[in-house]
Each structure stands twice: as structure tokens, then as C-alpha cells.
Image (tube, rainbow, N blue to C red):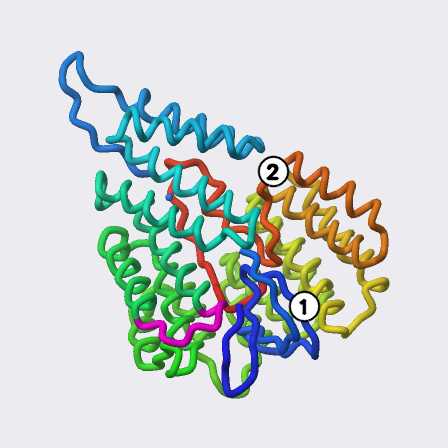
Amino acid sequence: MIITNNGSLTVYAESSIFTLSGKLPKSTTMKFNFSQSLSGFFIAIISVTIALNSCQTMDEMEHPVQEAYELRLDGQLDSAIIMLEELTTSDPDNAYAFYELARATHHMGLGSPADIMTAMESSKNYVNQALMLEPENPIFLYYQSRLEGLDFYGSLQMGKTDMDIQLSEMEASVQKFIEVKPSCLAPILTMIEIYGGLPPEMGGDSAKAATYAKKLEGNVEYAALAEELMITENPNYAAYWKAYADTYDTIVKFQEALGKAFLWEDNVEAARASFEKVFKMDDCQCRKTLYLDIGRYYMLMAMQGRAPLDTVAPLIEDEFNKFLATKASKPLRAWTKGQLAMVKMHSGDQAAADALIKEAEALDPYYSKAFGLPDRLLFIPPHKFLCEVNYYFRPF
């Protein structure tokens, strides 16, 4: 993401394709000077009133939505959207059909950076229709807050500075979600990152960040994550997270944060050792993206000119192939192959790049072209709730 901060251009690498130059700073926000950037870019129960012999059962309402979701993850996004559009017309009270149509439209936008903002606006409209039917569904509210955040983020990406309306809408959606689902604290961290990480002229407000951080004081994990976001002077993030990882050795997030802090300090072997501990602590497929984080670290080295691409390309491929050897979803496998294609292309091997692109498109014709990993929220089953920390101002 590109913003203007004290006269310099800064990129935050969650959803951008960009060209970088300069040294990778040792900073929790992972700010990079750059020369050019190319925009890349919810278990709730359906509330139904069943009239005898007249209304659809829950299974009848859920099954086509699940079918459309499975089509989408199987690389048939166009067919999924057609199915969902027909479903929202024939069954306009099916809130999950509108929600899944929002996610499918969002997914489609990932494959065309030029159309991403239009796709996001359509997704917001669809999830708002879902919320008109089920206004307190936490799955829908969480996704809505994510979309509002991406709208804010995208406006910053385009260099806008008057962001009061977008920030207010984002905060309002987060507040509504917290009222309905107070046990999910992840969006509070997002507000801390926004208010604590931006300069005042762009909406930053350290007092608001501190107020949000106070809401997390009763939770060891989230309080530690919030405190780290609030550090402003002489940060030593590896030491910070090592202290927490040693004290709370069963909390996976602390070990993961320690590994990422090692990456920020260019200590790849220590990062890899921390990530291996994470895999032993939690064998969830969701943790396997840490392989991609190491690979993207090497990509950043080349993009910034800190290492020749020829030197790091085998290291990138090794880490990405480790991920491809796991039970990854087709959209994430496609994204990974797309990134490998870029490495091959910039290494001068166009034939290998073309082959990888063909493989990626076969898995997901609308795979994300962004450097940042596509949001996992798009790829979980439609009736599953996911509470996950999502940073905007970090590459990993």
C-alpha cells in the first residue's frame, strides 16, 4: 500500500504488486521505499420461520450455496456466480446466497487488478443485502468490516488523503461486529494498527489506538499483539516476542510472531526454526503459509536489490514448493504458481513462466496477482466463522 508519510512514499505489502528499491528496514510495519507500485488487488444458523408444508428447510437453503462455493474453489468461479445470481433471484430471502455472491465477486476482482475496486463495491452491496435479511449475523458483519477496511486501504493505495468518511465507515462496521461477537478480538487489533500506524493527517490517532488497546488487557495473546503495535521507540521485536514465547510456550501465535520478527531482522534460519516449532504445535493447514512468508522474504530481497535474483530464486522456489506439497486449496496453489511464474519470468525463463501461468489458471482462472497472500476469509466454507488477525501494514 502506498501512502505519503513525511515526504516519502511508503508501501505496505498486504495486497499490492510492486517494485521495490532500498534496504529492508527492521520495522514492525515493514515500510519500504519504492520506485513504482502496481495495484494488485463468515457457524451462524439461518433464522427461518417454517410454515407447515410451505417454506424451505435449512438444508434446502444451504445446499445450493455450498455447491456454488465448492464450484468456485474448484476453479469454476464463472459457473458459481451464475448459480448464485439465479439463486438470489429465485430465493431472495436466502441471506447466505447474497453473502456467497459477495465473496465470489470479491474473488473475481482479485484476478483483474484494474477491476478490483468495482468488484469490491459490488461485494459491499451484496453483503449489505445479506445483512438486511440477517442484521446480526456475525459471519456477514465480520466480512463487511473487512470490506470496509479494504475500501479504506484501497483509497490510501490511490493516494487519497481525505479519508474521514471511509475510516468512520470502517470503524462503525467494526463496532457493530464487536457488539454482536465480543469474543472475537481480531478487528480491535486492526483499529489499533490503523490509528497507531498512520500519521494524524491521514486519520492516525494514538489516543484512540490506546483506547482500543485497553479493551484487550484481559487477554494475554491479544494484549501482547496490541502492545507490540504500540511500540514506537527503540524496538527490538525479536527480543520482545522471545520473552513471550519463552513465558507462554503453548501459545502458537507468540512463536509465529517470533519467527516473523526474525525475518524482519534478516535472521532467516532463526525464523525457520521458530516456524518449525509452530508446525509441531499446530498442524493446521493455515500455518503452512509460513513457508510462503519465507519465500516472499527472499522475493523482497531481490525486489529491493539486496540480493541478485539468480541467487535467491532457488530459495524462493524451495519454500514455495514446500507449500505446494501441503494440502493447500486450489486458489492458494494457483497464487503460489503465479508468484513462481513471476520469478521465472524475471530470471529470463519465459517458457517456464508461461507453463506455470497455465497451471495457475487451470487451478483458478481468477487467481490473485497481488504480492500479498489472498485473504483466507474468501476460501473457508460459507457457514463457517473465522476470527483471524489481519494486518494491512505488513508483508507477513
Most extreme residue toward the left is 51
- The residue that appears at 64% across and 42% down in the rendered structure is 333
* Relative side of 373 to 377, left or right: right
Residue 301 vs 352, above or below: the answer is: below
Q: Which amino acid does label 1 sit on?
A: Thr
Residue 86 vs 242, above or below: the answer is: above
Picture quarter containing residue 262?
bottom right
- The span from disc 1 to disc 2 (Cα, nearest Å) is 25 Å
- The residue that appears at 30% across and 77% down in the rendered structure is 208
The count of marks equals: 2
**Residue 187: % across, % down:** 36, 60
Q: What residue type is labelled 2?
A: Asp
Secondary structure, magenta segment, majority class: loop
- The residue that appears at 49% across and 64% down in the rendered structure is 248
- The residue that appears at 44% across and 58% down in the rendered structure is 389
Q: Which mark is residue 19?
A: 1
Query: Is residue 201 magenta-colored?
Result: no
Q: What element carries label 2?
A: loop
**In front: 228, or 189?**
189
**Residue 233: % across, % down:** 50, 87
- State whether residue 237 appears in this view: no
Answer yes or no: do the residues labelled 1 and 2 have beta carbons within 8 Å? no
* Relative side of 55 to 167, left or right: left
**Pointer 1 local density, CA inside 10 Å: few below 14, some 14–19, many at least 20:** some
Q: Which mark is residue 364?
A: 2
**Residue 211: % across, % down:** 29, 75
Quadrant of the image for the C terminus?
bottom right
**In front: 316, or 17?**
17
Instruction: Provide the residue span drawn in magenta.
Output: 156-164
